[in-house]
Image (tube, helix red, strand yellow):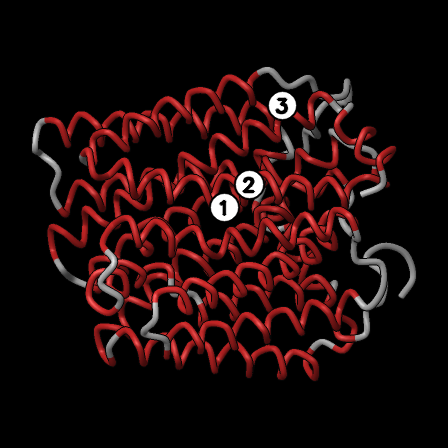
Amino acid sequence: MPTNQLSDLLCQRDFMRLWFARVAGTGASQMLMVALAWQMYDLTSSAWDLGLVGLFQFVPALLLALPAGHLADRVRRDRIVSASLALQAIVAVVLLLASLSSLVGRETLLAVSVMLGAARAFQMPAQQALLPLLVPAALLPRAMAFGSAGMQAAVIGGPAIGGFVYALGASAVYGVCALAFAAATLLAASLHLPAAQPGREPVSLDSVFAGLRFIWKRKLLLGAISLDLFAVLLGGATALLPIFARDLLEVGPAGLGVLRAAPAVGALIMSVLLARWPVERAAGPRLLAAVAVYGLSMIVFGLSRDFLLSAFALLVSGAADMVNVVIRQSLVQLETPDAMRGRVSAVNSIFIGASNQLGEFESGVTAQWWGPVASVLVGGVGTVVVALVWIRLFPALASRNRLAGPL
């Protein structure tokens, strides 16, 4: 990024407050999921139960996403984000106390998964719709790349720290998470938004589903968002990493932290590159190519029995996914008017949630049926096929040149 553009971005004080809040919240979330997944697998040794953790987060996120998007277009978005982060801090405290009291069981972990899914259902659309209010439109693609760099740094540090701190016990991880979520809450609550007030459109089924109709009518956005859904739904292997770490690669919880962090290392590298050299041409073809590379990297991961090769494959998958994220999120925000951003972001969050939490459930189920290796391989092949099919189904996406403006 040229120096003057970087300094312009860093001078956006509220953007930087949100950036630090996202870094703290994302790092805490990643640490929490490492501890929760390892604790669940220690308790049950079941791929099915690892998948259920993802499902129990996805269901409330699915049910609450559209109302949450409507709320984000009616209530100050910074308050929604801070309240969601505060709820996650409470979840971390509950897990801390339950672990110290030796009361953690399968049911406890599934119950808090529901609470996490509900909190993120409200956080994601409000947070996504908040960013365009904090930076000029010309800086938005770079702000997204810079924001993603910070988040990926947290995703790298979070699992690594969580894996090593877990050696002191799950309660130690949950204590660190509670402090980080509390800091993120305070930062989000300190934002100063522009004077314009949120819309007060009457609540109705028509207004709640307006974001879904908006995306359905714009095939470019529908293609970009659904591409991420099917690619990560099929190709994700996050839920199976405890199995690969313990049973196939034999690297323990510290190795699990490294595997969880590897995609974020690739994503961080790519986000820095995209902040310096943003996508200016061939946005659609690059998006589709990135999804295909993601699928190929998951095939390599499934076949590998070498820890370093497995970590490298995950690193490549993270780099490819970051290209997907920056292009897709930029298209969504630049193509959507502010009055609709909360509801459109809510629909986007449904697709993101499905591709992550529901993808974890899919991975757990297929691993239970076919084994973890076959599950990852089938998913990787399916992701490549989806990228090829989307070229034909969504020609407007495949031929999109610039992120904003005429094709």
Q: CA distance from mark 3 to mark 1?
A: 25 Å
Q: Quadrant of residue 283?
A: bottom right
Is residue 10 placed above or below 67 in the rendered structure?
above
Please tell me how crowded label 3 is: few (under 14), some (14-19), or many (20+) other residues with Cα within 10 Å: some
Q: Is residue 263 above or below residue 74?
A: below
Instruction: Give the CA separation, mark 2 to mark 3.
Output: 13 Å
Q: Please state if 301 lies on the left or on the right of 112 as rendered.
A: right
Question: Mark number for residue 65?
Answer: 1
Tell whether 345 sits left or right of 368: right
Q: Residues within 10 Å of mark 1 (few under 14, many from 20)?
A: many
Task: State the residue at coordinates (70%, 84%).
Answer: 392
In this rendering, does residue 138 appear at all?
yes
Q: Residue at x 22, y 54 (%)?
A: 252
* Secondary structure of residue under mark 3: helix
Identify residue for label 3: 17
- Which of the 4 quarters of the picture holds residue 158? top left
**3 or 1: mark nearer the eye:** 3
Query: In what element is the residue under mark 2?
Result: helix
Q: Quadrant of the C terminus?
A: bottom right
Q: Is residue 323 above or below residue 73?
A: below
Report the front residue among 285 and 130. Answer: 285
Three-letter amino acid code at the position of disc 1: Ala
Please state which amino acid type lies under the numbered disc 2.
Answer: Met
Mark 1 or mark 2, earlier in chain: 1
Q: Position of residue 352 (x, y in %)?
A: 52, 55
